Amino acid sequence: METVVGARFGAGTISATGVEVVIEPRSAGLVVTHVLGEIDLLGVSLLRPCFEHQLRNVQALVLDFTETSYLSAAGLSLLLQTGVDARTRNIPWALAAARPVLRPIEVTGLERQLPVYREVPPAVDAVLAPGRSLTA
């Protein structure tokens, strides 16, 4: 994988203080984006352009926050905006998240608005569900 910096996003890794993003292209136009670390305001400033770029260039997106240890209010806002952008572009997407991310989502009641799964495989299955026609 290549290291990705600045505004160029593809397969690879993006790093900033406290957050690391690994972009994993898969078949059928699906990208799984692994987000590790703490998502605070600084992390959101790294993630926002990355997610926006992906939604312009993928056919399905899974955000893997299972290794994310903290999610701020700014991070919640980013997830909500990602959902709006995905729906606008008719891109199926899902979020895989562990307890540190699930807790603020549940406390705020956002699990009804976000396609949340506890692990990556069910999230991938959801965006590649039968009836979805993704092309490679």
Image (cartoon, rainbow, N blue to C red):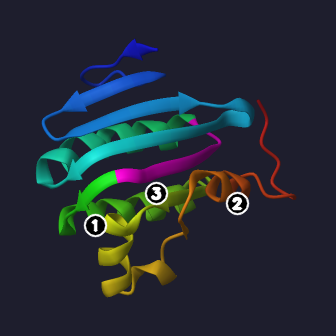
Vertical comparison of 123 with 49: above or below: below
Mark 3 nearby-residue class (10 Å; few <14, some 14–19, many ≥20): some
Amino acid at the residue labelled 1: Ser
Q: Earlier in the sequence, mark 2 or mark 3?
A: 3
- Separation of marks 2 and 3 at Cα, in angstroms: 18 Å
Q: Which residue is mark 3?
A: 85
x and y, in percent, of residue 112 in the image? 50, 83
Q: Which residue is mark 1?
A: 77
x and y, in percent, of residue 129 in the image? 79, 58
Q: Nearer the viewer, mark 2 or mark 1?
A: 2
Q: Relative to 61, is 83 on the left or the right?
A: left
- The answer to which of 22 and 77 lies nearer the viewer is 22
Q: Quadrant of residue 45?
A: top left
- Separation of marks 1 and 3 at Cα, in angstroms: 12 Å
Q: Which residue is mark 2?
A: 126
Q: Nearer the viewer, mark 1 or mark 3?
A: 1
Q: In the image, which residues are magenta?
A: 58-67
Q: Relative to 82, is 118 on the left or the right?
A: right
Mark 1 nearby-residue class (10 Å; few <14, some 14–19, many ≥20): few
Q: Relative to 134, is 119 on the left or the right?
A: left
Amino acid at the residue labelled 3: Asp
Q: Earlier in the sequence, mark 2 or mark 1?
A: 1
x and y, in percent, of residue 70 in the image? 23, 59
- The answer to which of 119 and 60 lies nearer the viewer is 119
Local SS, label 2: helix
